[in-house]
Image (cartoon, grey):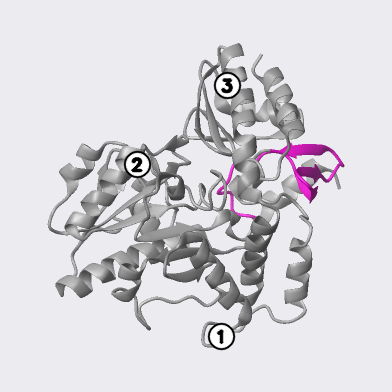
Amino acid sequence: MNMNDQIEEAEVSILHTYNRFPVVFEKGEGVHLYDTQGKKYLDFAAGIAVNALGYHYPGYDEALKDQISKLTHISNLYYNQPVIEAGAKLVLASHMDKVFFTNSGTEAIEGALKAAKKYAYVRDGHADHEIIAMNHSFHGRSVGALSVTGTAHYREPFEPLMGGVKFADFNDLESVKAQITDKTCAIITETVQGEGGIYAADKEFLEGLRRICDEKDILLILDEIQCGMGRTGYYFAWQAYGVQPDIMTCAKALGCGVPVGAFVLNKKAASASLEPGDHGTTYGGNPFVCAAVSKVFSIFEKDLILAHVRELTPYLESKLDALVAKHECAACRRGMGFMQGIVIKGRPVGEVVQKALEKGLLVISAGSDVLRIVPPLVITKENVDQMYEILDQCME
């Protein structure tokens, strides 16, 4: 069966909620993917910042196969060794206190919002609190996560959503202050906005949020789902700023391809929020995905993945800057570490993405006009050079 036939067959049964690219992938190796016709692609999308270790990284597959041969699911009514190990490693990497494992980043956001609301309920003895989120943010598509997503076209078809949400402008502290009331229980923001167009938070902005939250006993929630797990050269992007949240969400590269997310709480939030019966999950924290999480942390430590990202980032940025300097359609670059964006002007960004695909390079878009570069964290200078050569042709 050729790819066109495969695509037609897929459309018969799969609900059309994605405008997929016309390619069917069959396997991956290293930082490359192969379609069902055998064509090779350099992957600078990494499953939307998920596959931090690329494909079949030494030791990763073996850890999952070993766990499959033992146990994959038992529910959260019982303990299991992989969740104990994964939880300890995540708490250590974040220097926070407690973790709740979920099945996705969106679920992690839902849990974080509930924890903030419960914290305020315990403190004040009543509900009806408010949350401040950021314009142009993206936190997921479930009802709670959508309620704090600051992009109207995502929200409008599903309103009314969760009440008590106000929006402020990202990197504008005065805008946030204007939304604070006695009801405010949390402020939520991405440390680096992803879907909104690859905007990193200003240090002064995050420090200001932390200061406000400390003064008013408001919980600071940082969404690290896309920018976390090494993508900025730190386990979590907030560590580059020295601003620790009260609650952090993570997913994507946490498991490097298996469906797992988490929300992590500091001691203050953990000790006075969710209790037995307040929150739960059937599959979250199962032995299979936690074996993956545990192995990912082990690989990051053993193979110095964070140091590699920090070392290679200046080279990646220099090649992207060279594209901006050379091509009129490339307006500017922004981002942190291996989470980069080039603003495209004068032509649709989708045109550049499609041309790159045809030439064997996977890149994706963010917002309406940003070319998003989120490669596996194990790329080399040679891979960056290959990316540059293809994008150079696509931007002509």
Seen from the viewer's position, the closer of residues 307 and 318 is: 307
Closer to the camera: disc 2 or disc 3? 3
Q: Circle 3: is it few (<14), some (14-19), or many (20+) Cα within 10 Å?
A: some
Residue type indicated by callout 3 = Asp
Image quadrant where residue 395 sits: top right
Report which residue position mark 3 lands on: 321
Count how many numbered circles sit on residues in the image: 3
- Describe the element under mark 3 as helix, strand or loop: helix
Disc 1 to disc 3, how far (Cα)? 50 Å
Residue 312, which numbered label?
Answer: none
Position of 256 with respect to 238 (left or right) is: right
- In percent of the image, x 66 and y 73: which residue is there? 288
Q: In the picture, residue 220 is in which quadrant?
A: bottom left
**Residue found at x 63% / y 67%:** 294
Give the labeled residue for mark 1: 79
Q: Residue at x 15, y 71 (%)?
A: 124
Q: Distance between the residues labelled 1 and 2?
A: 42 Å
Q: Would residue 134 be visible to someone looking at this image?
A: no
